[in-house]
C-alpha cells in the first residue's frame, strides 16, 4: 500500500470549504483504487489564527510541513488583515521557503462550461509562472513616510539561476505536450535589464530543446493574442507578476476563476510541493456553501500526478469532466448547484467509473 502524507491548510474564506470537498474526493479515489491511501493532517493556519496568536505559521511550523509529501492549500486573505500581511505571513513563506519556483497553471474550457470567447474551445494552455523571485522577491522599501518627498521602491529581482531554471522547467513541460510549443513572455522593450536577460537566457536554454517550437510575445500584446488567437498558444513562460495577471485572464477565458488550478512545484522534490485553487478567499460567498470545488479537484488531480498516482489523477479528471458536462454547475458557472452537489456528483462519477471498469477512459472530448 502506497501512503501519501498530506498537509491540508484550508486558510481563509472559502478555502476550508473547498479543501474539505477536495479531501472527500481524494478519499473516494483512494478507497476505490485500493493501492494507495492518504494520511492527512489539517493545519488551522489562517487569518483568524493570526489575529489570535500573532502569526500565521507558528515557530517550527515550516519544519513540520517538511515531513509531508504534498500540501493542499485553500486560500489566504481576509477583511481583518491587510493583504500584504496575510500573503507574506502564510503563502509566500511556504512557496519561497520550500523553493517552489515553478508555478503551473493549466487552462482548458471543461466540457459543458462556456467560455466568453466565441472560439474558447481552442484554449488549451499551461501558464508557467516563475514563483520565487522577480516582482515578488520582497525587495524594496519606503522612506520619508508621510512627507511630500516620501519614496517607495519595489524592486524586481531576476537571477541567472532563477531565470534559467524556470525556462528549463517550461521547456521540459512543453516537450511533453502534443504541440511542443513554448511562448516566452516579457517586456524587454521597456525594461532593458532583467527582461532582456530573461530573453537571452531563454534562447540559450532553447538550444538544449531543439524539439520545442518557440516564439515570443510582449506581455501587453500577449493579452490580445490570448483573446483573439487562442489556438496559437500552448505553454507560456513569464515572470511572477506577468504570469499572475495572465493566469487570471486565462481563467476568465476558460469560463470561471472557480475552476482554475495551480501547482507550486519544487521540481527537485527537496521540499513538498503545494497545490491550490487560484480563486482566493472570495468573502462574498464564504459560508454560503456555493463555492465551486472544481478548481480544488483539478488541483488535486495535479497533486496526484506529482505523487505518481497517474491513474487516479486521470480518473479524477474524467469524473470532473463528466460532472461539468452534465451541467452540475455552481453559480459562478451560471448554475444553482451547491458545493456539496458538485462534490457528491464527482464522487459518484468516480465510483460509477470504478464499478464499470471504465477508469482508463481518456478525458471526454472537448464540447464546443
Ligand atoms: C495568485 C494570487 C496571489 C498572487 C495573491 C493572492 C497574492 O493572485 O495565486 O495568483 O498574486 O500570487
Ligand atoms: Mg493571481
Image (cartoon, helix red, strand yellow):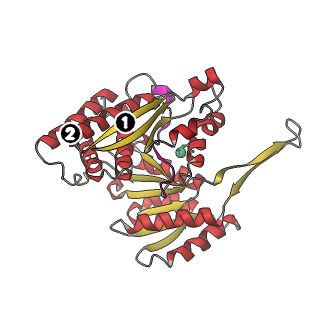
Res. 32 mark: 2
Residue 87 at x, y = what percent? 60, 38
**Would residue 78 appear left or right of 265 to someone viewing this image?**
right
Q: Earlier in the sequence, mark 1 or mark 2?
A: 2
Q: Residue at image x 22%, y 43%?
A: 33
Tell me whether the residue at label 1 lies in contact with that at label 2, contact meaning CB atoms closer than 8 angstroms: no
Q: Of 111 and 302, which appears nearest the observer?
A: 302
Q: Residue at image x 66%, y 61%?
A: 158
Residue 14 at x, y = what percent? 45, 29
Q: Disc 1 and disc 2: Cα gap in Å? A: 16 Å
**Would residue 111 appear left or right of 179 to someone viewing this image?**
left
Secondary element under disc 1, as helix, strand or loop, is strand
Secondary element under disc 2, as helix, strand or loop, is helix
Provide the residue span drawn in magenta.
268-285
**Residue at the far left in the pictured view:** 356
Q: Of 325 and 348, which appears nearest the observer?
A: 348
Q: Residue at image x 59%, y 43%?
A: 92
**Residue receiving disc 1:** 39
Q: Residue at image x 24%, y 52%?
A: 363
The question of residue 271 being in magenta is answered with: yes
Closer mark to the observer between disc 1 and disc 2? 1
Amino acid at each position: 500500500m502506497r501512503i501519501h502524507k498530506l498537509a491540508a491548510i484550508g486558510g481563509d474564506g472559502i478555502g476550508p470549504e473547498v479543501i474539505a470537498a477536495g479531501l472527500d474526493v481524494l478519499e473516494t479515489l483512494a478507497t476505490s483504487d485500493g493501492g494507495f491511501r492518504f494520511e492527512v493532517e489539517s493545519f488551522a493556519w489562517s487569518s483568524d489564527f493570526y489575529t489570535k496568536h500573532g502569526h500565521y505559521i507558528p515557530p517550527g511550523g515550516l519544519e513540520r510541513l517538511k515531513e509531508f509529501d504534498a500540501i493542499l492549500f485553500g486560500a489566504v486573505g481576509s477583511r481583518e488583515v491587510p493583504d500584504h500581511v496575510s500573503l507574506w505571513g502564510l503563502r509566500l513563506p511556504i512557496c519561497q521557503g520550500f523553493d517552489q519556483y515553478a508555478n503551473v497553471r493549466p487552462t482548458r474550457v471543461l466540457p459543458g462550461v462556456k467560455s466568453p470567447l466565441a472560439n474558447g474551445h481552442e484554449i488549451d494552455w499551461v501558464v508557467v509562472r516563475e514563483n520565487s523571485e522577480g516582482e515578488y522577491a520582497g525587495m524594496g522599501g519606503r522612506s520619508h513616510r508621510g512627507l511630500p518627498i516620501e519614496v517607495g521602491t519595489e524592486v524586481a529581482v531576476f537571477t541567472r539561476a532563477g531565470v534559467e531554471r524556470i525556462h528549463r522547467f517550461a521547456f521540459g513541460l512543453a516537450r511533453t505536450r502534443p504541440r511542443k510549443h513554448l511562448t516566452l513572455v516579457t517586456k524587454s522593450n521597456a525594461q532593458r535589464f532583467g527582461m532582456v536577460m530573461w530573453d537571452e537566457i531563454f534562447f540559450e536554454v532553447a538550444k538544449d530543446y531543439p524539439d520545442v517550437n518557440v516564439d515570443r510575445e510582449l506581455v501587453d500584446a500577449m493579452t490580445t493574442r490570448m483573446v483573439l488567437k487562442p489556438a496559437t498558444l500552448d505553454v507560456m513562460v513569464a515572470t511572477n507578476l506577468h504570469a499572475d495577471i495572465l493566469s487570471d485572464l486565462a481563467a476568465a477565458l476558460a469560463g470561471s476563476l472557480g475552476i482554475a488550478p495551480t501547482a507550486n512545484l519544487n521540481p527537485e522534490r527537496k521540499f513538498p510541493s503545494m497545490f491550490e485553487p487560484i480563486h482566493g478567499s472570495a468573502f462574498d460567498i464564504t459560508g454560503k456553501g456555493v463555492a465551486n470545488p472544481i478548481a480544488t479537484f483539478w488541483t488535486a488531480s495535479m497533486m496526484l500526478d506529482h505523487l505518481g498516482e497517474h491513474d487516479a489523477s486521470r480518473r479524477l479528471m474524467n469524473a470532473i469532466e463528466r460532472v461539468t458536462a452534465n451541467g452540475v454547475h455552481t453559480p459562478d458557472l451560471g448554475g444553482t448547484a451547491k458545493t456539496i452537489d458538485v462534490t457528491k456528483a464527482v464522487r459518484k462519477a468516480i465510483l460509477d467509473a470504478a464499478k464499470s471498469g471504465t477508469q482508463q477512459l481518456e478525458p471526454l472530448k472537448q464540447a464546443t
